[in-house]
Image (cartoon, rainbow, N blue to C red):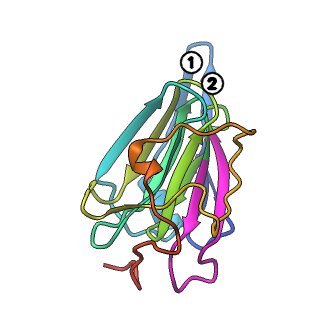
Amino acid sequence: MSIDVSELAFSGVYEITPRRFDDERGFFSETYNMHVNAQIGADLEWVQDNHSLTSQAGVLRGLHYQLPPRAQDKLVRVSRGRAFDVIADIRRQSPTFGRWLGIELSAEKWNQLFVPKGFAHGYLTLEPDTEVLYKVSDVYSPEHERTIRFDDQRLAIVWPLEGCQPVLSAKDQSAGSFRDADLPDTWKE
């Protein structure tokens, strides 16, 4: 298989790195293969692709999640630039509940992050003109979407901000705390 897969510190979370074939014409890469779903034990179908361009470094998007029955698995990658991608485990029954994990995704590393349901997700752009692409297993549903503050004291995420304040959307500025988050008892539909 032309894709490397490594399980990370949280159960069900994987770093996936497709092989990239470069030559004088450019490159070719198989960025998604349905057989990887079986390899990681994910019985799902991707139903929507999202593509985000962020023109400046220091923009922080997140932490976002959707409640069942519209909870989303995500496969996140960066096609241009770099982003610090963060997930927080919000599965009440998980031994890693309330812990976070951060990984740099970049066009240079060509890596991806598989995020199952039950994680809040966000990222900080590290370079101007960063493009983030991600597949999701359910459509966007505003009535099921929730947001947790990026700087929540309980989660204590260490963002590589280097003393700067991140640029946030109005939605992310008004996000609530992890303690007050709307979390289901189970993420199974």
Q: How many marks are shown on the rendered structure? A: 2
Alpha carbon of mark 2 to alpha carbon of mark 1: how far? 6 Å
Q: Which residue type carries mark 2?
A: Asp
Q: Which residue type carries mark 1?
A: Gly
| Cβ atoms under marks 2 and 1 closer than 8 Å | yes
- At mark 2, the secondary structure is strand
Q: Residue 147, percent across and down?
A: 43, 59
Question: Of residues 1 and 154, which is closer to you in this image?
Answer: 154
| 189 to the left or right of 54 | left
Q: Residue 48, percent across and down?
A: 30, 49
Q: Residue 152, percent across and down?
A: 59, 62
Q: Which residue does the numbered mark 2 point to in the structure image? A: 22
Question: Of residues 161 and 8, which is closer to you in this image?
Answer: 161
Q: Which stretch is magenta?
A: 85-105
Q: Which residue does the numbered mark 1 point to in the structure image? A: 26
What residue do we see at 49% from left, 39% from top?
Answer: 30
Which quarter of the rendering shows the C terminus?
A: bottom left
Question: Of residues 23 and 135, which is closer to you in this image?
Answer: 135
